[in-house]
Image (cartoon, rainbow, N blue to C red):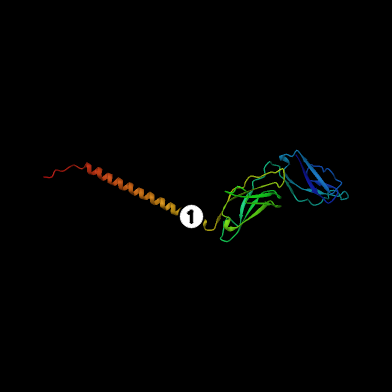
């Protein structure tokens, strides 16, 4: 595989940080080739340039950093709710799926739905998926991939549960009622067992008493 790092420069003498030689120094566009890319070549790259009439040691400022990720699979994204995972009545919510690389395609899934709920191409390392508050509660996950072939896909994000405001307290109250009901049944069963044991003990004790002959 040959990976071309295309660097648009403004002068005739580009130089790249690293042990690479540009293929053509006669234009303002310099291409640096990495052949047989390996994991060791992954990392952050930047470039600088200088003119031939500049004094030695004088270079331009460094370019923006280009992150090169060498992998068969993109890092797993994260999924967070903005402003939070609990939706107030009448409010909307946004789910942010964040990876590490800009310019990716993002897909949002909801548990129970086979097809993507939303699909966004983003120039940033993340994508925001708006959701209507009334329909937001549920469990979600997301993934991202390269926007063109050859496609490289990430794993799904960890699931994110969105709930409506008040549902948590309602579930908590219902759980308490269930626990109280179970405790009541246990006490009733214990009471029946104690009563049965008491009657059994009295019957056995009565059978052991000596019979008296009344004259």
> Which residue lies most toward the bottom here?
90
Residue at figure coordinates x 25%, y 44% from the top left: 203
Q: Using residue 135 as the reference point, say whether residue 9 is left or right of it.
A: right
Count of numbered circles in the view: 1
- Left or right: residue 87 compared with residue 190: right
- Residue 40: image quadrant is top right
Pick the quarter of the image with the N terminus. top right
Kindly identify the residue that appears in the image at 27 percent across and 44 percent down.
201
Residue furthest to the left: 215
Report x, y in % for residue 214.
Answer: 13, 45
Q: Which residue is drawn at 80% across and 43% down?
A: 32
| Residue 172 in sight | yes
Label 1 crowd (10 A; few <14 / some 14-19 / many >=20): few
Can residue 17 be seen? no
Q: Which residue lies furthest to the right in this view?
A: 53
Q: Is mark 1 on a helix, strand or loop?
A: helix
Q: Quadrant of the C terminus?
A: top left
Say which residue label 1 marks. 172
User: Viewed as shown, does residue 99 lie left or right of 90?
Assistant: right
User: x, y percentage for residue 111?
Assistant: 58, 49
Quadrant for residue 88, please give it.
Answer: bottom right
Q: In the orientation shown, which residue stands out farthest toward the top? A: 36
Along the line of sight, which residue is nearer the eye, 52 or 121?
Answer: 121
In the rendered image, residue 135, in percent from the top left (x then y), is placed at: 58, 56
x, y percentage for residue 62? Answer: 78, 50
């Amino acid at each position: 595989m040959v990976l071309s790092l295309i660097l648009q420069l403004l002068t005739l003498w580009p130089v790249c940080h690293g042990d690479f030689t540009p293929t053509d120094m006669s234009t303002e566009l310099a291409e640096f080739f990495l052949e047989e890319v390996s994991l060791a070549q992954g990392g952050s790259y930047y470039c600088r340039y200088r003119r031939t009439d500049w004094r030695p040691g004088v270079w331009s400022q460094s370019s923006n950093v280009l992150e090169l990720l060498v992998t068969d699979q993109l890092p797993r994204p994260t999924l967070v709710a903005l402003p939070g995972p609990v939706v107030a009545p009448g409010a909307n919510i946004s789910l942010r799926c964040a990876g590490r690389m800009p310019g990716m395609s993002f897909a949002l899934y909801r548990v129970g739905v086979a097809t993507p709920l939303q699909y966004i191409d983003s120039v940033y390392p993340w994508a925001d998926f708006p959701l209507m508050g009334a329909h937001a509660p549920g469990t979600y996950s997301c993934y991202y991939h390269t926007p063109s072939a050859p496609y490289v896909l990430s794993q799904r994000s960890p699931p994110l549960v969105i709930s409506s405001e008040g549902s948590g307290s309602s579930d908590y109250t219902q759980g308490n009622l269930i626990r109280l009901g179970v405790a009541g049944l246990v006490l009733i069963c214990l009471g029946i067992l104690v009563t049965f044991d008491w009657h059994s003990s009295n019957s056995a004790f009565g059978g052991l008493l000596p019979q008296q002959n009344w004259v």
